[in-house]
Amino acid sequence: MSNHVYIITGVSSGLGESLAKQLLTDGNTVIGLSRTNNESIGPFAINGKYKFYTVDLTMTDKLSKVLQEIMTTIDSNRLESITLINNAATVTPLTEIQHCSDDEIVKSIQLNVAAPMVLTAAFARLTSDWRVSRKIVNISSGSGKYPAPSMSLYCSSKAAINMFSRCIGMEQETVPDAIQVFAIDPGMMDTPMQRTARESDMALSAYFASQKEEGNLVDPARTAQQIIELISSPASNNGGVHQVH
């Protein structure tokens, strides 16, 4: 059994699903966190090991307890590395801010920003005395750098994730056995999130539709492989902010 463990949020579809499948194929242990289970992932656990936790990531007050429960199932003495991949996110609501309900705003920020922060804090606490390689991978987006109408919540949340990653990366510079922190922009992929954007009625939907029509969307399986190669490379030992396309 692999001595590398990956905890991934948002494995029900898209990039999270592809990451889980590739890592399992490579013989790793994957722990998935999502509201719904993706039954297609299980068969990929021939060489690796897969465990799924049903978790509503917008319920941020429950997340530390969930991660603590997960950690009690892992024998750190047998590990070489443990990696938290904060992948789950929502692109909705795709509308001008005055048309967003209070509940939509709060849930978007809970999922896209608060959940990764809470999980990161718990991960750092719970593994502070583990003498293994520790990594945190925050999945960002080009939207974190480029403002867009009707996407204020998504763009702002990804900008927050970029800054958060930089800040905790600086904190880890002074810590023995530091956690490697990555913020990765995966580029535009052919995922359910991209479909939601191109099928919406916002002004930019035509642009997102054209990216699909022109064949510019990347297969998330390819992106997943690039991310795995990046975070596994000795050249990336210091983490940082990266793009893969």
Image (cartoon, helix red, strand yellow):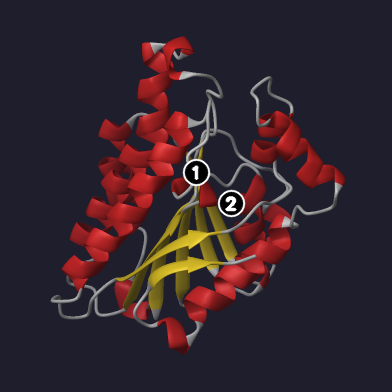
At a point 39% along the width and 81% down the height, the residue shown is: 80
Identify the residue position indicated by label 2 in the image: 16
Q: Secondary structure at mark 2?
A: helix
N-terminal label among 2 and 1: 2
Q: Is residue 119 visible?
A: yes
Residue 96 - label: none
Q: Quadrant of the C terminus?
A: bottom right
**Left or right of residue 25, residue 165 in this image:** left
- Decide which of 215, 55 is in the foreground and name it: 215
Q: Quadrant of residue 228?
A: bottom right
Label 2: how many Cα within 10 Å (few below 14, some 14–19, many 20+): many
Confirm or deny contact between disc 2 and disc 1 (CB under 8 A).
yes
The percent coordinates of residue 140 (x first, y second) are: 47, 53
Q: Is residue 15 above or below residue 133?
A: above
At a point 41% along the width and 35% down the height, the residue shown is: 111
Label 2 is placed on what type of residue?
Answer: Gly
Real-space CA distance between mark 2 and mark 1, rounded to the nearest whole angstrom: 7 Å
The percent coordinates of residue 86 (x first, y second) are: 43, 52
Identify the residue position indicated by label 1 in the image: 88
Q: Quadrant of residue 114?
A: top left
Label 1 is placed on what type of residue?
Answer: Ala
- Decide which of 168, 122 is in the foreground and name it: 168
Count of residue discs: 2
At a point 24% along the width and 52% down the height, the residue shown is: 122
- Decide which of 207, 218 is in the foreground and name it: 207
At a point 57% along the width and 57% down the height, the residue shown is: 50
**Left or right of residue 79, residue 245 in this image:** right
